[in-house]
Amino acid sequence: MSAKALLKSGRVVDPSQDLDEILDLLLVDGIVASIGKDISAPEDADVIDCSGLIVSPGLIDVHVHLREPGEEHKETIETGVQAAVAGGYTAVCAMPNTDPPIDDPAAVGFIVAEGRKAQAARVYPVGCISVQRAGENLAPIGEMVDAGAVAITDDGNPVMNSGLMRLALEYAQAFGIPVADHPEDLGLSAGRHMNESIVSTRLGLAGKPNAAEEVHIVRDLLLAELTGGQIHLQHISTEFGVDAIRQAKARGVRVTAEASPHHLVLTEEAVEGYRTEAKMNPPLRTAKDVAAVRAGLADGSLDVIATDHAPHHYDEKESAFEDAPNGLVGLETAIGIIMTDIVSEGVIDIATMIDRMSCGPARAFGLPGGTLSEGAVGDVTVIDPDLGWTVDPNAFRSKSQNTPFTGRELKGAPNRTIVGGRTVWTR
Amino acid sequence: MTAAMASSRVPALGKDLVGLEFLSQEQILMILDTAEPFKEISERRIKKVPVLRGKTIVNLFFEASTRTRVSFEFAEKRLSADTVNISASGSSVIKGETLVDTARNLEAMRIDMVVMRHGSSGAAKFLADRIPSNVINAGDGRHEHPTQGLLDLLTIRDHCDRVQGLKVCLVGDILHSRVARSNIYGLLKLGAEVAVCAPKTLLPSAIGDLGVKVFRRIEEAIEWADVLNILRLQLERMEEGYVPSLREYNRIWGVTARRLELAPQDLLILHPGPMNRGVEIDSDVADGPHSVILNQVTNGVAVRMAVLYLLAGGQPGSAEAAKKEAGA
């Protein structure tokens, strides 16, 4: 017997087909079978009433840290994908800065296998650029791609050696995958803990200037231009960085880039009082930078919203600011934050939000999904645009609770997450 | 315990002394005024009054310190508190215990006050937010060192009879200096004009936004200032490349007698110590007629007594009486 699901009367928003209307969506055997008005339910179909709800191609987060192997006290692949589906994500790309790092085909295979076993969101491994993420020699990129890697990155670390970055951008072209880089010039940022500004001066914390990120962004853009390679720039946080990417795109450079929810809504002031939950890398910056990241998201200079989901055990964040690790969990708050602070404020509309959270990520990383066209994978996110809720980290499915958004009242939340035609989570 | 301290009035300083940034001018003046009657105790033959009898105080030093730790200890002992010293090398910190566990353990032993020096900015606030005991910041990272700022203010006031309207320049490694921040906040609140002078590598990028003037060259600073507070240049700064060499630093930014001779007036010379003679300050300046470096040390004990007294609930106007009570 085939598995069928009919999503009735939802507002289908699919920017890949320029769709935004009340339609029915039929999924059969894990594939989008048809989309249209008044589709009659096959008799064995599971009929889901979506009236008042938004039906979106499944959300994809191209930047998450699932911490397994090696830091299972923070997150595991299983808890990470549970958090993902509870946040409305049907697929995530797992960063390779684990212990050991994902720098060979066996490790990639482990991520693929554990991801399948978890039976929730799809897990796409991202392999390392360099062996051991040491920034010296290329990892076996071709073999990792054969094993399932969808991109390469040394994330957590930038690739400091420009020669190595050039080689990666050239070599990866054989496999049609992007090279993702965490843009940060460590010479300007190592041993520093927040944005460099009057706030860092007052708090007595060593600051990272915007230039630490921008120098590296510009270098990567130049190398992508030089090689014709595909660069994906992670978590852009500065005004000049957004401008540089915008200009590079206009020149035809093959670049995609991320905006993280926290860089869209928080400024460095969140660090006041040495709040370690607001410690992240790149750091929260100024209102001017936030405005520029928003503008970049709106005009498409920044292609995707990626959470940089970075779980940490509460013990690790419960420390002096300088000793605390960087990052926040993001999978379960992203939709609410973006709908409340970005869509409601008119920075982007719902269709653009879905483009940046589903279609854009699928395009950037060459992934299945990002569309509800007939024959596409049956990955669907149903969103309740009117549901009000309060961020309560104790309710997270993630193993970790490190978020600066505790207690935020939000409007808009995932209602149902469907992966391969199968509902893996409902509210 | 004195009657004044046993009263239920709201403590004039709050629970902790984490920094000067969020104190008011009135609170700072109150501490300085309270320090005055305590100065005399250290001049007595028997240097002890029962103001903090029965209070237990832990001096928790995660970083090496001689001057500050000893100064606090004298202040505590002269006020009859029971004190325990914990230094990083002899404590479970080395064994990997976290700051929060250290705090909880201290709390479980029912102590009254913690004086803490820690290498991380914000560590004092971290501790203060987590334990009900009074916390006194004895220096946290490059953030603040409030009692040093207060004793510098007291020393300036002693010698100039005022702080208001004075031109005070902090010279040296402002970037890494907790003393600098506490001085800047305190001086500005008391109405001084404040400047800093250092190579730009040793200045925080946004220092001007704190409301201070910036001098690139020491000659300009000397010409402008009434008071120089000269900060230690740590050897590591040269190793980290902030300045090319200590010799060059002395040549360009060192406070020398020759340079001071060019000043239109005599300058009061402070240095929070420990000094690198021949680097940031020459011996003939450190030992010269306008140096009040040892007065700072003496005032340090009185200021810390005042802070301990006030945080313990002592009333500002009653210090003289508290001191005499129980007839030391």
Image (cartoon, coloured by chain):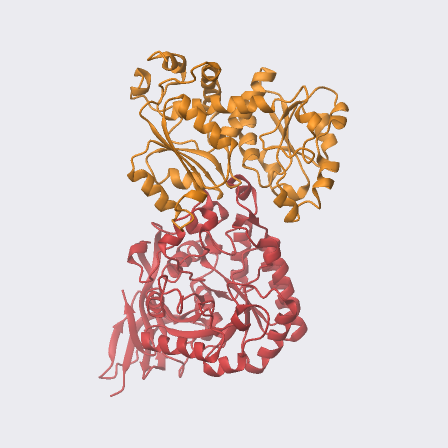
Chain colours: A red, B orange
Q: Residue furthest bottom?
A: A1
Quadrant including the N terminus of chain B: top left
Position above or below: A127 against B15: below
Q: Is residue B261 left or right of residue A423?
A: right
Nearer the observer, B214 or B298: B298
In the displayed structure, does residue B228 sit left or right of residue A306? right
Res. B125 visible in picture: yes
The answer to which of A313 and A420 lies nearer the viewer is A313
Residue shown at the point (61%, 70%) measured from the top left? A165
How far across and how far down the image is residue B139, in percent?
49, 36
Residue occupying the point 56% across, 18% down: B157
- The answer to whether residue B21 is seen in the rendering is no
Q: Is residue A134 left or right of residue B23?
A: right
Residue A412, image x and y in percent? Answer: 35, 59
Say which quarter of the image contains residue B197.
top right
Residue reaching furthest to the left: A43
Residue B184, placed above or below residue A323 = above
Q: Is residue B12 above or below residue A216?
A: above
Residue A213: name its quadrant: bottom right
Query: Which quarter of the picture shows residue B285?
Result: top right
- Residue A333 in the image, given as x and y percentages of width and height: 37, 58
